[in-house]
Image: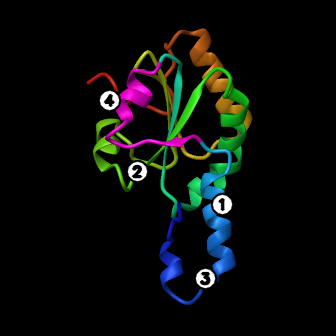
Amino acid sequence: MTIWHGDCNNQQSSATSVKRMNAMSDEGSGREVGKANFDSEVLRSGRPVLVVFWTPWSPACRAAEPALNEVMRELSERVRSVKINADENPHLSLWYGIQSLPTLLYFVDGVVVARIVGAASKNAILAQLETSILNKGDSTISGPSNENK
């Protein structure tokens, strides 16, 4: 899959730069999910699911990507990880109140039990997810959300 970036249309980006950015977008990441498979991949999953709302053009998403990739790899035995391109899935972004990118939602049995907004370190993400697991979903991160619709 090739992801075209806004800068690629003007003559300022080289083919090498585009290849590097495309490789970053796929490296160590979870499966890409959208409207068609969100229900089966996230809401009906037998395992907890870490959902990352992102866009390929976002500087914050690119900055957070190494930490997110490490988290996804470290949790791969216990937690399914998926990515949702917020631009390509505005209905999901609106439904879950995504206002900043990246935003991580942690689903257990189809219910959001944790929310992390913005770039965070690997250790901060893991600590919050562990707290959510220990509290059996009593943890909300970074303010109110509208997951209980």
Which is more N-terminal, label 4 or label 1? 1
Q: Amino acid at mark 3?
A: Ser
Q: Is residue 45 left or right of residue 16?
A: left
Q: Residue furthest bottom?
A: 11
Which is more N-terminal, label 2 or label 3? 3
Q: Which residues are magenta?
A: 30-45
Distance from Cα at disc 2 to Cα at disc 1: 19 Å
Q: Is residue 77 magenta?
A: no
Pointer 4 residue? 146
Distance from Cα at disc 3 to Cα at disc 2: 24 Å
Which is more N-terminal, label 1 or label 3? 3
Pointer 3 residue? 13
Relative to the observer, which residue lies in front, 131 or 112? Answer: 112
Distance from Cα at disc 1 to Cα at disc 4: 33 Å
Secondary structure found at label 4: loop
Relative to the observer, which residue lies in front, 118 or 35? Answer: 35
Q: Is residue 64 left or right of residue 140?
A: right
Q: Is residue 48 above or below residue 3?
A: above
Q: Is residue 37 magenta?
A: yes
Q: Residue furthest front?
A: 1
Distance from Cα at disc 4 to Cα at disc 3: 39 Å
Please provide percent x and percent y for residue 1: 53, 60
Pointer 1 residue? 23
